[in-house]
Image (cartoon, helix red, strand yellow):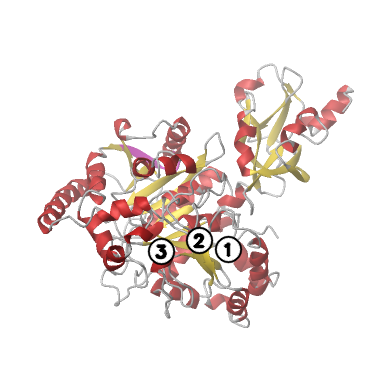
């Protein structure tokens, strides 16, 4: 079963009777069988417990439960009754009798918890490698970091093991893993989701975050999860957001000055961010250049001021008693909080107050801000060799967020040439969660075609054909077809044929001047269906496959006859010079046959 796990699709299947929660649980159990090669899970509910959650929904009114039968994963610093909470430190573990407030709200709405996910220990890190349970591996290429600290929560959704997941976000932990695994990552306004039952990192700054396949799914989960909790002294209700820039025809968005942008040598990331700026303009946005310096100055306070002492305070008794049980980079960071004085604390609080006044003035000129989520991504080996410096690079655009009381949504923004995802973040003042998610939805649709709940389409991971196990689907129209000369470039990468099909009726087909390659061009009028094949290959092989494609050909989004979107071969317009229109033949094989080619 390759059915998408986005909420709209699952609810439709439940309502039609084609699927039951118990049936879905059996599918997920099969998907999770065997080795956890990505180091996603710290603990999972046993088979009987999962089936019991599903059976408890039998006979219930689907319409009355907004998350009926929707599976979700929980970062293992958030309590789920009956399973240990470890914060990725086995010696710290305890088993709660009561679930965290936010978890219980989701279960009461019909959601099914699957298990507890891996994280950077004590939620200290943005890379996903700081865990005794193993470095959590990227869903697209296991040699790369998943992002952290909410690493397992993101990868569980990206690999089709949960529809959504909970993370926490103090310094970027709900956004960086989303960017690295092609997900939406929403960091709500601070206090909107209760942190009762969450092991604190910085209690005054912590936020429970949401990973989802689509912005619509994140908004649906937020609607259930948010709510004032009198038992959480940092809780506050979401206030009305006012102007909905996310649905407005015209809005103003801030973009950092060129000198403030950092991609740490990653040219692909720089290109994809520039494309995201243009995408927002195409949605009605007017770009306004902003000075990022005060935001960056704020970010430096997070690990250079009293908030490190707050991390130490959160686990002081345990830290002082068993320091050797703590992962070395985490121990080094938290130990720095022991010597911060009260005077130092007030000095930093005064500095923050002044910086916030400056940063708040930015919102007089813009409705929303756009930044990269992270400037680059690293291999696991490189991160482990240089854990502090490279981790700080990952927080360049994220560390200031909660100190300035901002809300943010990380959104997929395309793929690097090596096949790894890149993401951007939309930022706004608190209580703007709805407009942020509405704009994120529009950005997803602009990026990937038919995406989102509004047209019952597949979520980003499916639309880009990332299937369980990290597989990518690609449509081919020329010499890569079965039995033709370049097909070995697919089979040599362990690809398998999924289907022989046709494109939607919006393309013209050309034989390029060399006579060996076709060019597929999307047109507004006069299009036709073109025969193609859809192949599936490991995501880790996709980057090298794309890198070998010569100009003017490339990989873009291709719409199939059934309306689904896949990655597929397209041609730049410049390649049409002296090309012959062969649309009437309906495909490359028919054209070769007409020429008498032996294939």
**In the image, residue 191 lies in the stretch drawn in magenta:** no
261 vs 127, left or right, is left
Secondary structure state at the residue bearing disc 3: loop
Secondary structure state at the residue bearing disc 2: helix
- Identify which residue, 171 or 248, lies in the foreground: 171
Mark 1 touches mark 2? (CB < 8 Å): yes
Q: Position of residue 319 (x, y in %)?
A: 30, 63
Secondary structure state at the residue bearing disc 1: helix
- Residue depicted at 46% across the width and 57% down the height: 132
Residue 8 is tagged as: 1
Q: Position of residue 542 (x, y in %)?
A: 63, 38
337 vs 580, left or right, is left
- Mark 2 / mark 3, whichever is N-terminal: 3
Residue picked out by circle 2:
217
337 vs 130, left or right, is left
Badge 3 crowding class, 10 Å Cα cut-off, few under 14, some 14 to 19, many 20 or more, is many
Q: Which residues are magenta?
A: 282-288
- Closest to the camera, between mark 2 and mark 3, is 3
Q: Is residue 518 above or below residue 216?
A: above
- Mark 3 / mark 1, whichever is N-terminal: 1
How many numbered discs sit on the rendered protein? 3
Residue picked out by circle 3:
87
Determine which quarter of the picture holds residue 435. Answer: bottom left
Quadrant housing the C terminus: top right
Query: Visible in this render: residue 402?
Result: no
| C-alpha gap between disc 1 and disc 2 | 8 Å
Determine which quarter of the picture holds residue 595. Answer: top right
- Residue depicted at 36% across the width and 43% down the height: 370
């Amino acid at each position: 079963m390759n059915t998408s796990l986005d909420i709209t699709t699952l609810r439709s299947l439940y309502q039609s009777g084609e699927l039951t929660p118990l049936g879905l649980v059996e599918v997920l159990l099969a998907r999770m069988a065997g080795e956890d090669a990505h180091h996603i899970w710290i603990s999972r509910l046993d088979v009987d417990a999962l089936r019991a959650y599903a059976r408890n929904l039998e006979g219930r009114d689907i319409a009355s439960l907004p998350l009926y039968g929707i599976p979700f994963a929980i970062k293992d610093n958030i309590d789920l009754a009956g399973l240990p909470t470890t914060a990725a430190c086995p010696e710290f573990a305890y088993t709660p009798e009561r679930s965290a407030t936010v978890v219980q709200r989701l279960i009461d709405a019909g959601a099914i918890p699957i298990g507890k996910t891996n994280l950077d220990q004590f939620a200290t890190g943005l890379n996903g490698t700081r865990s005794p349970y193993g470095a959590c591996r990227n869903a697209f290429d296991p040699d790369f970091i998943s992002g952290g600290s909410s690493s397992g929560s993101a990868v569980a959704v990206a690999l089709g093991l949960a529809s959504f997941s909970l993370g926490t976000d103090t310094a970027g932990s709900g956004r960086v893993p989303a960017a690295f695994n092609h997900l939406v990552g929403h960091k709500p306004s601070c206090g909107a989701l209760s942190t009762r039952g969450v092991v604190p990192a910085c209690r005054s700054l912590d936020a429970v975050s949401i990973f989802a396949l689509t912005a619509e799914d994140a908004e649906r989960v937020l609607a259930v999860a948010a709510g004032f909790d009198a038992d959480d002294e940092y809780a506050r209700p979401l206030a009305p957001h006012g102007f909905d820039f996310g649905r407005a025809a015209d809005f103003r968005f801030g973009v950092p000055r060129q000198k403030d942008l950092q991609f740490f040598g990653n040219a692909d990331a720089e290109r994809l961010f520039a494309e995201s700026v243009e995408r927002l303009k195409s949605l009605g946005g007017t770009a306004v250049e902003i000075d990022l310096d005060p935001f960056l100055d704020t970010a430096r306070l997070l690990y250079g001021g009293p908030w490190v002492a707050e991390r130490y305070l959160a686990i002081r008794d345990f830290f002082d008693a068993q320091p050797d049980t703590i992962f070395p980079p985490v121990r080094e960071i938290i130990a720095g909080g022991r010597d911060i004085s009260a005077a130092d604390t007030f000095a930093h609080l005064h500095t923050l107050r002044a910086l916030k006044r400056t940063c708040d003035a930015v919102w007089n000129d813009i409705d929303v801000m756009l930044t990269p989520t992270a400037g680059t991504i690293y291999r696991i080996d490189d991160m482990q060799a240089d854990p502090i410096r490279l981790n700080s690079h990952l927080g360049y655009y994220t560390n200031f967020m909660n100190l300035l009381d901002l809300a943010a949504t990380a959104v997929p923004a395309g793929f690097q040439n090596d096949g790894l995802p890149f993401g951007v973040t939309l930022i706004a003042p608190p209580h703007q969660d709805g407009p942020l998610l509405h704009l994120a939805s529009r950005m997803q649709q602009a990026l990937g075609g038919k995406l989102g709940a509004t047209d019952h389409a597949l979520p980003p991971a499916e639309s880009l054909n990332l299937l369980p196990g990290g597989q990518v689907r690609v449509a081919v129209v020329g010499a890569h077809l079965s039995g033709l000369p370049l097909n070995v470039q697919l089979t040599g990468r362990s690809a398998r044929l999924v289907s022989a099909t046709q494109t939607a009726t919006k393309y013209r087909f050309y034989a390029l001047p060399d006579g060996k390659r076709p060019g597929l061009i999307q047109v507004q009028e006069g299009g036709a269906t073109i025969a193609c094949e859809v192949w599936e290959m490991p995501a880790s092989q996709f980057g090298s496959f794309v890198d070998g494609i010569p100009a003017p050909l490339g990989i873009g989004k291709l719409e199939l006859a059934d309306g689904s979107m896949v990655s597929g071969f397209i041609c730049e317009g410049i390649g049409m010079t002296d090309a012959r229109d062969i649309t009437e033949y309906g495909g490359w094989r028919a054209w070769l046959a007409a020429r008498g080619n032996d294939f």
